[in-house]
Amino acid sequence: MEELKLELKEKIIEALKLEDLVPADIEDDAPLFREGLGLDSIDALELMLLMEKNYGIRLSSPAEGKQVFKSVTTMAQYVAAHRTK
Amino acid sequence: MEEQRQWSGKTDGTLWMHKALLALMKVLPLPVLYLIMGLVIPFYLLFNPKGRQAIWHYLRKRQGWGRVRSALGCYGNHFLFGTALLDRFAAYAGRKFKTDVLDYHYFGDLAAAPGAFVMLSSHIGNAEMCGYMLSTHLKRMNVISFPGEKSTIRSWREKMMGVNNIRMIPAEPDLGWLFTLNGALSDGEIVSIHADRNFGSPKSISVNLLGAKADIPKGPFAIAAMRGLPVIAAFTMKAGLGRYQVMLFRVDTPDMEGLPQEEKMQALADVYAATVEKVLHLYPLQWYNFFEFWKY
């Protein structure tokens, strides 16, 4: 799980072009949106694409999606359980 | 974006006013309602200085009109906006409008081909009527809308849209609507979005529009660029009494393929701005952004 979290942080930094950050700057349980990393709706769509391209996960349910994108930890747990790639 | 560059997303008026208007539509001809509305406009202009001033600046500085023509233009602009709103209610009440669609193939070809595409619209002409006129059974159209609209307007709209294979996705403040949008894109559907309003992200792109810089939202162009989707722009312009003309443009071009994402977004936004200019040269009074759109 720790490896997957690190991989996700690297992919988030790359996809969102957060060049000022390194994986260690992103806390596992910090909120990704608004407070925490302060991501917005465009970033959210980038993360959905990241999940689809890298792990074969298609997110279309608002209730489920909001839970998945709470933090890097929730993303990693979801990827581990649902990945097809 | 500062406060004056926002719109609450609500149609003015109370529930009984909307119902009364719908009832009036059934007994009075539409031109009579236009006439009554036309009598009220001078008062509206008097008590809505911000909106009036924004249109005055648009006509004087961006269209280069003289003082007298601009003053008359302010009235004409508000009158046409009023007729657009009345036509919307008339459509809810079941009225059909004559429509000419120019360059339908831009829409029809993409609707018939597999895969999602983005349809950009603006607060120019009568954007809502566009959905009713361009719907297709081949693909569902998902319209990103403001969440604050009153439930009656929303239900009338949903009734109209349901029969036209259109789904509204209200951009609620939480991020839930983005997952519905993502599902629509993955399923190869149409996403219709205003390219002159922010939905969930304050990021913008600077474009040259009618000779001056203006900031337009980045979101609509980001949706298209990140997935490499085709993009069209659609404008539904009032072309006469009971008549509309839908103008369609292809926004993405083959030379944009392979561009880095940021450059592609800018290129899409530049082409979109050029299409807005073309439409405004033909229909200068149908510009309905009642706030200072440009960086003067």
Image (cartoon, rainbow, N blue to C red):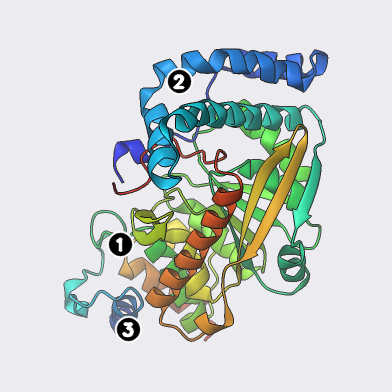
Label 1 packing within 10 angstroms: few (<14), some (14-19), many (20+):
many
Output the chain of dot 2: B
Asked if the residues shown at circle 2 and circle 3 are in contact, with their CB atoms under 8 angstroms apart, the answer is: no
Between disc 1 and disc 2, the foreground one is 2
Nearest to the observer: residue B272 or residue A56: B272
Q: Which residue is mark 3?
A: A7
Residue plotted at (55% across, 43% down): B284
Figure check: A73 above or below A36: below
Q: Amino acid at mark 3?
A: Glu
Residue plotted at (55% across, 71% down): A58
Mark 1 vs mark 2: same chain?
no
Q: In the rendered view, does B186 fall on the left or right side of B75?
A: right
Residue B60 image point, x, y percent: 40, 39
Q: Quadrant of residue B249?
A: bottom right
Residue B67 image point, x, y percent: 41, 31
Between disc 2 and disc 3, the foreground one is 2
Q: Which residue is mark 1?
A: A32
Residue plotted at (65% across, 28% down): B83
Label 3 packing within 10 angstroms: few (<14), some (14-19), many (20+):
few
Figure check: B139 above or below A77: above
